Amino acid sequence: YHLAETAAVAQVNEDQAAVVASGAHPTHERKLAPHVGEARLAEREATLNALLEPDVVLARLTSASRPEPGIQLFWNRRTNRAIVHAFNLTPANAGRAYQLWFIPQGGKPIPSVVFNSEPSGHALVREIEVPPGVRLTAAAITEEPAGGSPQPTTTPILAGALEAS
């Protein structure tokens, strides 16, 4: 019995030593998870608040492919910032990414953010700068090299009209 008790104490001490050696502290590790959850909740609340601002307009970027991917572009005209929410968007192949383009009236596409979707087909991109002082008529998504392109190199896979700016 004494030998089993000694072995158990030695195992506990070994586990504690491993935690200390890793730089973690058992009580801090337990507290980490709630802080991560709180941070995610705060991030979601900030996104929801941004979507509900009175100056936000919604544009839908659509495609004819099946299952139909889609993008909701929430544009705050007062701050000239946008949020992109993608769904059913298959992740781009290795070395490739999706790029958002703003299309001005009578002009060349203006490059914007580069992003990829999660394996679930969802993506959420915040704090996108919308080009100021330009009359934008549409937005589009193309698949580009991972770092993006100064001009589209592929045909848009999603596109949609923007309300007159």
Image (cartoon, helix red, strand yellow):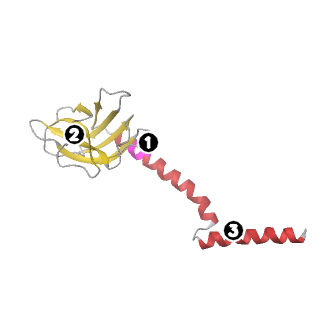
Q: Which residue is mark 3?
A: 15
- The image position of residue 99, as x and y in percent, is 26, 44
The residue sitting at the left extreme is 106
Secondary structure, mark 1, is loop
Reply yes or no: does residue 64 show up in magenta: no
Work out whether residue 95 or residue 76 is closer to the camera in this orientation and state it.
95
Distance of label 1 from label 2 (alpha carbons):
22 Å
- Mark before the other along the chain sequence, 3 or 2: 3
The amino acid sitting under disc 3 is: Asp
Q: Which residue is mark 2?
A: 154
Magenta region: which residues?
A: 44-48
Q: Residues within 10 Å of mark 2 (few under 14, many from 20)?
A: few
Left/right of residue 106 with respect to residue 60 in the rendered view: left
Q: Residues within 10 Å of mark 3 (few under 14, many from 20)?
A: few
The amino acid sitting under disc 2 is: Thr
Q: Which residue is mark 1?
A: 119
The amino acid sitting under disc 1 is: Pro
Taking the spot 64% from the left edge, 65% from the top edge, the residue there is 26
Relative to 126, say whether 32 is above or below. Answer: below
Taking the spot 36% from the left edge, 38% from the top edge, the residue there is 86
Which mark's residue is nearer the viewer, 1 or 2?
2
- Mark before the other along the chain sequence, 1 or 2: 1
Q: How many marks?
A: 3
Q: Residues within 10 Å of mark 1 (few under 14, many from 20)?
A: few
Taking the spot 29% from the left edge, 29% from the top edge, the residue there is 63
The residue sitting at the front extreme is 94
Distance of label 3 from label 2 (alpha carbons):
55 Å
Which mark's residue is nearer the viewer, 1 or 3?
1
Q: Are marks 3 and 2 in contact (CB under 8 Å)?
A: no
Which mark's residue is nearer the viewer, 3 or 2?
2
Work out whether residue 91 or residue 47 is closer to the camera in this orientation and state it.
91
